[in-house]
Structures are given as C-alpha cells and as structure tokens.
Image (tube, rainbow, N blue to C red):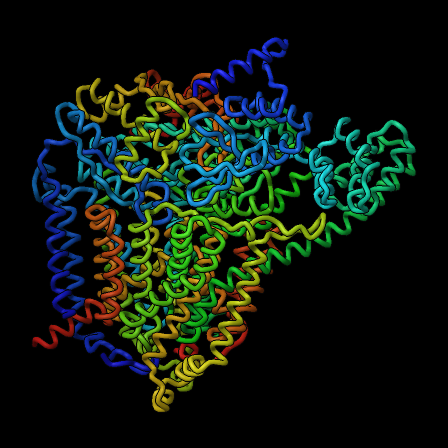
Amino acid sequence: MIRIMRLGQVRHAAPAAASGGDFGGRVFYAVLLAAALLVPLLNLAVPESSALHLSTYTVTLLGKYMSYALLAIAVDLVWGYCGILTLGHTAFFALGGYAMGMYMMRQIGSRGVYGDPLLPDFMVFLNWKALPWYWHGFDSFAFALPMILLAPGLLALAFGWFAFRSRVTGVYLSIITQALTYALMLAFFRNEMGFGGNNGLTDFKDLLGFDLHRDSTRVGLFLVSAGALGLGYAACRHIAASRFGRVVQAIRDAESRTRFIGYRVENYKLWLFVFSAVLAGIAGALYVPQVGIINPGEFAPINSIEVVIWVAVGGRNTLYGAVLGAVLVNFAKTWLTAALPEVWLYALGALFVVVTVFLPQGIVGFLRQRLGAGS
Amino acid sequence: MNTKYLRNRLLAGAAALGLLAASAAQAEDTIKVGVLHSLSGTMAISETTLKDTILMMIDEQNKKGGLLGKKLEAVVVDPASNWPLFAEKASELLEKDKVAVVFGCWTSVSRKSVLPVFEKDDGLLFYPVQYEGEESSRNVIYTGAAPNQQAIPAVDYLMKEIKVKRWVLEGTDYVYPRTTNKILEAYLKAKGVKPEDIMINYTPFGFSDWQSEVAKIKQFGSAGKKTAVVSTINGDANVPFYKELGNQKISAEDNPVVAYSVGEEELSGVDTKPLVGHLAAWNYFESIKTPANDAFIKQWHEFIKNPKRTTTDPMEAHYIGFNLWVKAVEKAGTTNTDKVIDALPGLETPNLTGGMAKLLPNHHITKPVYIGEIRDDGQFDVVWQTKGTVPGDAWSDYLPGSKDIEADWVTLKCGNYNTVTKKCAGQNF
Amino acid sequence: MLLVLLALCLLWMSTARADDAAPLPVDFPGLVAALPQADFAAKQAIVTRMTELHVPQARVLLAAWLDNRLESRRSDGKVFVVEEHDGTLVLVDPFDGKGAGEGAADDFERVRSNNALRKLLKVSIAQFDLKDPDPRVRAAAVRQMRRDLDEDTVTALRAALTQEKDGRAQHEIRVALAVSDLGAGDAAVRLAAVRALDGETAADVYNALKPLAQDSGTESDASMRAAAIGAVRHIEVWRNFYEALETLFFGLSLGSVLVLAAIGLAITFGVMGVINMAHGELMMLGAYTAYVMQQLMPHHVGAALLLSVPAAFLVSGLAGVAIERTVVRYLYGRPLETLLATFGLSLIMQQLVRSVFSPLNRSVATPEWMSGLWQVNDLFSLTWNRVYILVFSLVVFLLLVLILNRTPLGLKVRAVAQNRGMARAMGVRTERVDALTFGLGSGIAGVAGVALSQLTNVGPNLGQSYIVDSFMVVVFGGVGNLWGTLISGMGLGVVNKLLEPYAGAVIAKILVLVFLIMFIQRRPRGLFPQKGRAAEGT
C-alpha cells in the first residue's frame, strides 16, 4: 500500500467522462426512467395477489431513497467537486422539510383532534393562544414553496458569506458546519420555538388536496421525487461541466493558485454552496410527506456524517455514485434492521470501514477500474 | 483479496433482494406478532428489555399450545431510535409481514410517528409506557399510565403525607414533561399553592452537567418551607442528575425528589447509596410481593438467564397488554384487527400486584398507583398506594384545551369527542 | 426460632398491660429485639424511647441504622451492627460492642428505614452527640438540632450551654438559642437575638431573619427591624460573592470535563490529523474498564477506580494502536476519509459494547472520598468529585505536555507531525511513531472515560454525547495546540456556566455554539493557530 503523505498532493484525476462520455450518468437516467415507469405500473395496475405486485410500502420506501439520493447529490456537488466537506447538510434538508411540514400542518385545519381551525394540535394542548408570526402564510402552497427554497438557501448564503470570505477551510469548516446543525437541533428541540419540540410535526393529512394515505398519492410522490432527482442530477451535471464547474474543481485542487489567477474563489464557493443547500431543502420537502414526520432529530450531526458516507460509499465526484451510495446504504439499513436486528450495526460499520480503506473511490471507482482493466 | 470480498458482498446483496421478495410469500401457519422496539441508538437502553419481555410472553404462550391452535411467531425489527424509521418499520410489519398485532414504541414521538401508519393499515399497537395522555386512537391500546394514574396521585401524596409546600417541577424539554407539568401546575394552583412557590425548569435531552441546576434547586429549597422536586427527567439525563443531587447533599428527608421516569432498571445503572429515600411513582414495583409477581420475576430471570436483571413498570404493562390481546383473540375467535379491537374493551386480566387491569372504552386501562422510596439495593419500598385501581383518563381535566374532550370507542366510536360542540374532529378512518 | 417467638410473646405480655395501643419494651435490649418485627410507626416509637433511655450503645446502633448497617439474622432474629466484606458480614454485638463472628449476607435481613425515620434518627443521634467528648461532634450536633427547634431541644441546648467549655461549640449553641429567641415574646430578647445573629451566614439563620427584615406588619419595633435588615444585608453580600465564585467553579469544572474529553483528540486529530470519530467510543472503553475493575475488586471501590486509570490507558491505548495499524495507516493524507472509517468503527464499538455488556447502563460506584461536599463555609461548598476531576484533568494535561516536550517519544511525534519526510530521513521510524501517537491519544481518551464514569452514564451512548463537543474544543483552541485545547475547554465551560443562569441551559449552549461559529469566521485557525499536518489542508 502506497503511503500518501500530504493532503492535496494526490488528487484523483477528474473523471475522463466528465461531460461527453458520461456512461454512469446514462445508466443512471435509464434506471431512473425504468423505475418511474415500472413502479406505478406494478403498484397500481398489477393486482395485489400477483407476485409482481409492488406494495405501497415499497413504493414509499423507494420514494424515500429518491429524496435521500437527491440530498447525496447535493453533498457530492460541494464535497466531490469543490472539496468542501460539509457535516451540516442535513440542516438544510431539515429546514426544507420543516417548511413543507408547516404547510401540511396548516392544511389539517380544523381536522385536528382538538378541532381548532387555526392552531396545530401541539399548540392547543400546550396552551398557545395565537399562531406565532412565522407560521402565517404557510396555509398556502404558493407561500410554502418559495420558503422551501428560501429557508435553506438564505441560511446557506449567510453562513457561507462569512465562512468563505474569512477563508475558513478544511476541517475548520467541517466542524463549524457541524456546530451549525447542532445549534439548530438544540433550538428546534425547544418547545418555546413553536415547531413542536421533540415530537416535531406529524399527523399530516393531505398535500395539495391529495390524501396522503392513498396509494395513488404515494405513487405520485414517488414520481415527483424521481423527477426531482433526475432534474437535480441534470442541473448538477450541467454545473459540473460548465466553466463555473471547472473553476470550482480548480478551487478544490489548488485553492490558492486559483485565487492568484484572479478568480474570486469565495464567490464560486458561496454560490455552489447555496445551490447545494437549496437542493438539500427540496430533498427534505419531498422526504417529509413520504415518511410522515419531521422532527429535530433530522438535524443531528450524526445524520450529516451518514450522508457523507453514502457519497463516499458510492464514489464521490461522480454524482451518480452519490445516488448509488444513498440507495445502497439505505437499502442495507432497511434490510439489515429487519433481517439482523441485533447485529446490523456491525455490518453497517464494517461496510463503511471496508469501503474507505479498500475502495477509496467508492463502488463507482472500483467498477470503473475493473471495467477499465477489462476493456 | 478485497475484490473477492466485494464480489461476495454484491452476491450477498443480490441474495438479499431475492429474500425480500420471497419473504412475503411464507406459509400462513403461524400468528405473527410484531415487536417494534429500538435495539440500537439512544433508546436501546430502555427498549431492549421490552423486546425481551414480549419474546418471553410469546415463548410462554407457545408452551401453552399457542393461540387458536397456531403457534405465535415474533417478528423483531430494529427502528434504531430513529423516528421516521419507526414509521417505515411499522408499515413493513403491517404491510409486508402482515403481523396480527404490534407491541412497541417507548417515546411519545415514536408513537406519534407510527400512529398514521397504524390507522391507515388498520393495525393494532400495544403501547406500554407512561405518557402525557391527550390521545386515544382506535388502533392503539395504551397500557402505560396516563397523567392521572401517576403524576397527580404522587403530588397528592407529597402534599398530604409529607406536607410539601414548595415545588420544583424539573423536566426534560419534550412533550411528556411539558404536558405533565402543565397539568401539575394547574392542579397545584387549584389546591392553593402560590405561584412563587412553584419553579418550573426544563433541560435538553441527555443533559449531563447538572451543577447549576441542582444548585438552583438547593437554593429554592432552602427557603424554610418543605420543598419537593417532581422530576420528569428522561432516561440518560437521570444518572448525572442523581449523582449531582447526592454530591450536593440534597437529602431525601429535606427535599424529596419524586421521579416519574426512574424505575428499577434505570437505578441498576446508578450507585444508589446517595439516593436512598428519594421517591418514584409507578403502577408496579418489583419489590411488591404477590404470587403473580414472584412467578413473573422467576420466569424473567430464567428467560434472560441473569438473576440480577430487574423487572419494571413498562414490562408489567406489556405483560398486561399481551394477556389482554390473547384474551381478545380468544374471545373474537380470530386475529382480525377489527374484531379484536371490538372485543378488547371491557376485558380484564390480573396485573402483577394483586389487582385487575380492565381495558376501558377509551383504550386505557385501570391501574393502581404506588409511591416507592428508593432503597440502597436499587429497589423500592412502597410507602403509599391508592385504594383500588385508578381508571386511565386520556384527556386531562386540568388542561383548558382538553377538559371537554372524551374518548369512547364503544358507544361514541370516537377518540376525541367534544362534549360541548358534540363533534368528533380529525377522524380519517 | 421458636425460642425467639416465645421471648417476643413474653415481651409482648410484659408490656401489654400498658394502655398504649403499640406496647413497647422498656429496656434497651427489649427495644432492640423488637426492631425486626416493628413497622415504621413502631420503629419511630422505638427510636424515641431509645433516645430517652440514653444508653451509650444506642448511639452506635442508631448511627449504624442510619448508615444501613443494621441487620437481623434470619434464623433467630438477633440484631447486629455489621460491616460488609466480600459478601460476608462482620458482626458486632450491639450490646457490648464486641465482635460476634461473621455471617453470609444472605442469612441476614436489613432493618429498614424510611425518610421520616431517617430524619428522626439524625435528630436522635444529635441528642447523643451533644455529650460527645469531641467538641467538633458537639458543634455538628447543635447544627443538626438547629434545623428543627422545639421546646425540648431548646431546653436541652440551654442545659448543654452551661456545661460547654469549647468556644466553637458554645458559639453554635448561642446561635441556635438566638434563632429560637427570634420568636420570643419579649421585644428586648428578640432584638438581642438579631444582634447576636448579625454576622452569621447560615441559610437557616437567613431564613429566620428574612421575614423580620421585610414584614413590617408583624414586627413593629423599628430598631429591631433595622438590625434585621442590616444582618440580612451582610448575609446577602456574602451570598452574592460566593454565588459568583460557585458559578466560576461550575464553569471550570465543566471546562475540565471538556478538556479531558478533548485532550486525547488534540493528539489524534490535532497532531496527527486523523478525524477520529471513534474517540468517544475510546472514552467509553475507558469508562467500561472502570466498571470491570470495580467488578473485579467489588470491595475496594476506591482502589479499583485508581487502578482503572492505568488500566483504561492500556485498554484504550491498545485499542487505538489496533485501529491505527488496521485502518488509519492506510488513510494518512486523506484526513476526511479517516472520518468515515472511524465513524464505521465507532458504530462497531458501540454495538460490541451492547453485545458484551448489554445495552443497559452500568453502575460505577463512587468511592467514599470522592462523594459529598467540601463545605468551605456556610455559604460555599464544592462537590468533591468535581474538585478531583478538575485536578485530575490538569494533571493529565501537564503529563501530556511533559511527554510531548520532554521525552524522546514526544520529540519524534512532533518531528513526524511537522515534516514526515524529513523525520524519516533522519531515521525516525515514522510508522512506529504513528502507532504510538495514536495509542497515546486513545489512551488519554480512556483515562478521560474513567473520569466520566464518575459523572455520567456508563453505557453504549457515552461516546456519542461528547464527540461533537470534543471537536469544537479542539478546533476552537487551534488544531495542534495543546495549550489552546486547555484554554478553549476551560473558556467554553466558564462562558457556558456564566450564561446558564440568565439564558437557561439550552440557550446557553446554543449561544456558545453561535459564538464559536462567529469566532472561527474571525480567526479561521482557532485561538492559537499552529502549523501541523492537518492545518495545511486545502
């Protein structure tokens, strides 16, 4: 095993197939399209008795994986392409989720258990007299939708503005992103904040008039998630291949040199970071109606680390690798927590260790190496 | 070597996919019982024991010949203390494994998370932990205590027997302490306690540096009036809290602490010497001597193969819940959820402390209330108990929002019927 | 057994003539014999009667009872004062104070007490102690009695005052009598009492004076009220001063915990550049080592704890070396990837502990000398465990600084950290140094775990709750700088505790985090920036 001395000395060569021969990307699109066609068909058209029937449980599960995959892409964009290791991306994910949750909370209206037309249930039984100001407007989707984008976007803008301008880099940046999401978690846990404290927001009934408990809505949500994933992927791919993206990759490989050439490094970093945060927010907004709950646990620093691990497992700096990693790790989790409930953490932990030690470029990197060697 | 490993891994993954598809089509000769308790993550400390309790109950039922001529089969999953994962695992149990009943959850948020799933898929959940009330679902049986079965009797005891005049309500900042303290505050004020004699304080989950908080309690308690601390501190934060209490010499004789979330199992992780005399309010204590309890403890020790393991209140709740379910299935003659839910109200089963637990129309049960003093061996001496059992009240009479609400799944068929507006709000199913 | 029953029967018959509902033996041996069968009400009566009898043996018995060291033999119901050693009880006869052999703990049943009884026991023992030869014991007894003054105790105290020769004990009695005099009918007596109490700082004195100082309705005498106000003000000045001192101590104590948790990380992360997410689990291993040591030596709690410091250093240190040799060494130069691998390791270690020790928390006992309060004066006290941990953290820190600056190993560690290639060229075996450095940092984590076992849960989640804070401390102090870690840990602790009374625990923590984020923006390399492998990243 070759010992690599210094960080930054050896960089994985940017994938040869960055723009033109994006084989992995094509596979990704094909799989996504197939899923988008097959899943509704197998769930709605195939009768339940048939072996080919896809249960709504599986559809929801796949929808959840899609939103996780979108989050993973967002992380890969800043980490894989710009070298910003963010350990706080679930903060943006959760903020998007909360914005969506607040909208769905208001949609319950007087159908809550206390029948209060204005206040959500958790406010009624903790004796809130009036709706807090930041809850106003969330009864309309036209207001909630921009909020889903703005809440994470603005936080990322404010945070990135200061951080990148002060040239906070490396582990320092990682740790303060972690501090950010940790602080938000503590804040959202407080019941006085008016976001439902530890219980968060639950008991959603419908979204844009569609009953969340109907199978067709679930399939619809899956399709929207798949669509968002496809679009998100295309947008990231476009950014990565653009001039902007090339500068960003130059920053990753040699930040000072890029600055000396005359690029405003902090601006590039900032906009990439904000875009990535918005993407994470969208992922969160898609995630919440499918799992049916948003609570401050989503802000936990551990969750952010896990996202980074999905990307690493799949293979960073490829985008589709992030998707692969997110789906694979989460599938492993779903499967192992039921199949080996007592010991599944060993398997998951071992997976992380083995992948980082033996597959530094993740599964995609490994496959590429094998295919490259084979051809 | 690593490539070989990876290939094996991929193969294993593929095999797993196949298994996932195949498991749905298993033989139907058993009754499946879902167990939805965290076995990893922060809640594993509390919930693992409950998983084992249910496994023991199933084991025993199978030794008796099973149920309706079929064997019971446990389906254990690990929701890993992750609330969205609770919902996912619940629908996996109901939709994929098609379990007849689920025993599970500990925290309120996990219950809230799975509630829509159980209502949508028409499942049946037995929830074994004391909680804040303000809920009654058709698909959930609450075998833990409602606030009126734990919080209020304990305060009554302190007020009447110990002559406490000043109160500290100390809790972790989440919904159970918040609601319980709201109820207690209203109750204390109704009993003539002045606002300046009540101090309410919240700390975050897993809080570990209690120096300032305990110093504050000490100062509040040194004002010359008998002061008690009502603690709704959750799980992990308790050990450092009690250690600090012990070190700052807050003695049980002067400032008793009555805890609602500290039982034998929590105490088994603490050095109890400095805690002797502090109180806990529960519906069950391991130290209560009855033939049923002795048998249960013996059975538990044999099952878990460790004579030092304790039994706790939520375990008794699962014991009651499991027996209620068995009786309901036998009465209905089927495991069909709707029929079992209809059969459940009114059923009675002995609890472990010599009384009867009866399932009420509001899906809560009747329970005796005990106050225990901590002994130096981590057990409790019962110092007070209610005469007979207390029926669980889903909607508190001391909260303005819920005093007009009633739950009745027998005649009204509603979990939150408003007696003023005569309406049943928020029912989807 | 039959004999005892018979004896009890006789006893009962001998006292049954009294019209009292609960017939009570009249002599000390009879009272002792009645103990095992008595309920709590009867036990109270027995204690009162024993106090009245005032036999010297009763004091020993009552104190043992308060201490949970009073047991009755199952076979014959005989009561003994016991001392437990290795599951056997060393018996002492309560009547002659002589050894009465040994017995197995299972053959005995404890004579139980409850809160009301323990309170009564304390008061009773104080009555005995009033005549103790040691003046300090007498003074403490007076203090105990002062908390619960009634006519009987006041009479007893007045009598004691005439006998008392020791100045300090005399003073305590005068204070107690003055407190009692505050409620006297005679205004002059009351005024004298207030004057006598001026300068006293105890909480019960304060509580007694406070109503006199504020409530003009009950106290019409103006001079008296003025005196009371003055006395109260004196106390309050001192109270505020000591409160500030206490907050400072709380802060330093929290800081010492943070420093302990972070200091191992300052080596593995700060010096080596490994983002060691398993650091928390290495601390957990240390805490479990303390637990295992106590299980191995169940009757030497303190010694076990002391021994577990080196043991934990070894266990966690070896675990660290193993981690370095099997995983981390493949990842040098890829610090961000060490994060991922060590995160996987932390999951495995957590689950390992769950499998081996069960998911339940384990109880680590606190030795006698570490528990309780160091009562500096009436208003100021420090908890011993915190004092020890504060000192311990400083000792560990200084040792570490010495190792790094004054030993050949430290020299090599610094050399490798500063320039690996050059160090290797100079003949330093860098691989060995890497393993040892990682082992050192991990070992320190284990030592920190032993300290944490005295403060918090010993369970599988122990590491998780400290890992985020540890990283914050190291980063705030400046990666690669040990002194920075010390100052940052202590500083964050104090700031947190200063904010806590005003903002509450949660907001205080959030404010500290926000402050930290802002600070890093201002100084992107922490308090004390230093060059090191990690510091030179992108």
Image coordinates of residue C432 in percent, x first then y, are 33, 79
Image coordinates of residue A309 in percent, x first then y, are 29, 63
Write down the quadrant of residue B262 in the picture: top left
Image coordinates of residue C259 in percent, x first then y, are 51, 64
Residue under the point 45% across and 65% down: C471
Is B161 in front, or is B78?
B161
Image coordinates of residue C403 in percent, x first then y, are 47, 76
Total numbered labels: 0
Is A311 in front, or is A64?
A311
Residue under the point 71% across and 49% down: C379
Write down the quadrant of residue C527 in the picture: bottom right
Is C359 in front, or is C342?
C359
Q: Relative to C142, is A159 on the left or the right?
A: left
Q: Residue C88, can we see it?
A: yes
Q: Is residue C165 above or below residue A263?
A: above
Q: Is residue C96 above or below residue C170?
A: above
Q: Residue A250, can we see it?
A: no
> In which quadrant will I find the N terminus of chain C?
top left
Given the current orientation, which residue lies at the most extreme bottom position? C426
Residue under the point 67% across and 28% down: C51
> In which quadrant will I find the C terminus of chain C?
bottom left
